[in-house]
Image (cartoon, rainbow, N blue to C red):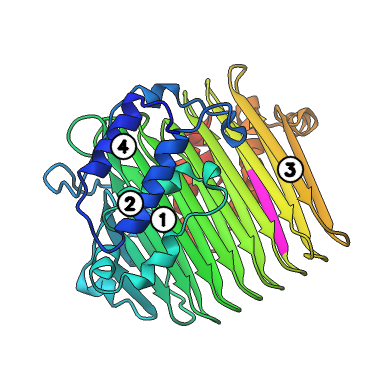
Amino acid sequence: MSAVMTPAMRSFESQWQGRRADALSPWRESAMQRFLALGVPTVHDDSWRYTNMRVLQAQSFRDAGANDSALSAPGDASWLTDQGRIPSILIVNGHPRLSAVAAQIDGFEIRSLRELVATEPSRLSRYLEATSDADQRRWELLNTALFADGLHIEIKRPIDTPLCLVHLTGGAGEGNAAYPRVIISAAPGSRATIIEHHLNAGTDATLCNSFTQAELGAGAQLEHYRVFTGHEDATQFDSLDVVQDRDSSCRQFTIALGGSVLRTTLQSRLGEAGAALDSYSLLVGHGERHVDSVVIATHGAPATRSRQTARSVASGSSRTIFNSKVIVSAGASKSDSQQSCRGILLSPTAEIDSRPQLEIHTDEVKCAHGATTGRLDPEMYFYLLSRGLDRDTAQSLLIFAFVADVLTRISLPAARAAIETALIAQLPNAELLRAFR
């Protein structure tokens, strides 16, 4: 049985029918048929209860393609690269522009997915296998069916120099859709930092459906950032899947600073003993922005650990959602998890929703969660006023102290400074905050 064929669904099917066959076509066909049967998520789907897709359903989309003539990197495309000191790769509508230098960054093996599809499709097919929870992974299914290119990054050893992937989405006219795909494979004992910066070119409405998959071998360490700074008409659905082996460690940062509608998903499977996940989310609602962030950590083995820290700031008539879940599977005894979700409302028309959840199927575990949403702490506010600070300064300092729980965890000084600068520009009394940095 197929879902209702709205204009959006018909346009996705049309894009599929216009694609050339390749070595991955059997997996793509399976993914597309499952997507067409399930349809675009609605508010009746539990994990989408806070995000209404009605407006998107009424739109039609076309594949943006590489579209070199309509796109060029804007001036701020490299503001996370420490003025060029961090190596970067530009990815235009999912199509990487691999230079000889980028492809030979010491310690990384970087290849385009288009090249691998043509020469070694067996290296990719296992990443395209459909999962049993496909109804919760509809945008991943669509990405699998429609991505044309992307990156395969193999981390071979400990690497000190970060790598920045600059995702640029857009094109001439409205209704452009892009499907960036990134696959990261970290060898046992390797270590690296990868930044994914998502932004848009132009002012026309776009849809970006991005999907990153990461596999961490035994003892591997990955620090991963995804930073979203799309323009106010952009819609983005971003999925990140992390599979972790024994004693591996993943530190993941999700920073939402732009876009009209942004939905981010992180699903991590701690598959072997000693695997650890630390996820940090900074969700900034500004104007009429809608940010919906989902983090699901599945403890699939004993003695695994996860930490989820989210801080939300909402102003104007924006809405932010943090929907977190920890699943402790049968047999995963001595698992340790904590969820901390806190939000600050800066206007009476803003809204913040936090929903921490626990699903435990075994004994001998240590799991805790907490969520709070409200105004600035009145006692701290009064204290600062009593020390002679004016109201604007006191408010600015309290807001900045609130988000410091995430910012202080960023290990790259240049990335932290750049993110702070972009964040401050969207907060009240920006000039005061810049003075107190």
Nearest to viewer (mark 4 / mark 1):
4
Kind of element beneath mark 3: strand
Above or below 300: residue 286: above
Residue visible at 75% across and 38% down in the picture? 371
Which mark, residue 246?
none
* C-alpha distance separating marks 4 and 3: 33 Å
Packing grade of label 1 (10 A; few <14, some 14-19, many >=20) is many
Q: Quadrant of residue 98?
A: bottom left
Which mark, residue 357?
3
Residue visible at 23% across and 49% down in the picture? 73
The secondary structure making up most of the magenta span is strand
Residue visible at 61% across and 48% down in the picture? 295
Packing grade of label 3 (10 A; few <14, some 14-19, many >=20) is some
Image spot of residue 67 (x, y percent) = 16, 46
Look at the numbered discs 1 and 2 and tell me whether their residues touch, using CB distance below 8 Å: yes
Closest to the observer, 95 or 396:
95
The answer to whether residue 130 is visible is: yes
Residue underneath mark 2: 167
- Of the residues shown, which amino acid type is indicated by label 2? His
On whether residue 309 falls in the magenta region, the answer is yes
- The earlier-in-sequence mark between 3 and 2 is 2
Image spot of residue 138 (x, y percent) = 47, 42
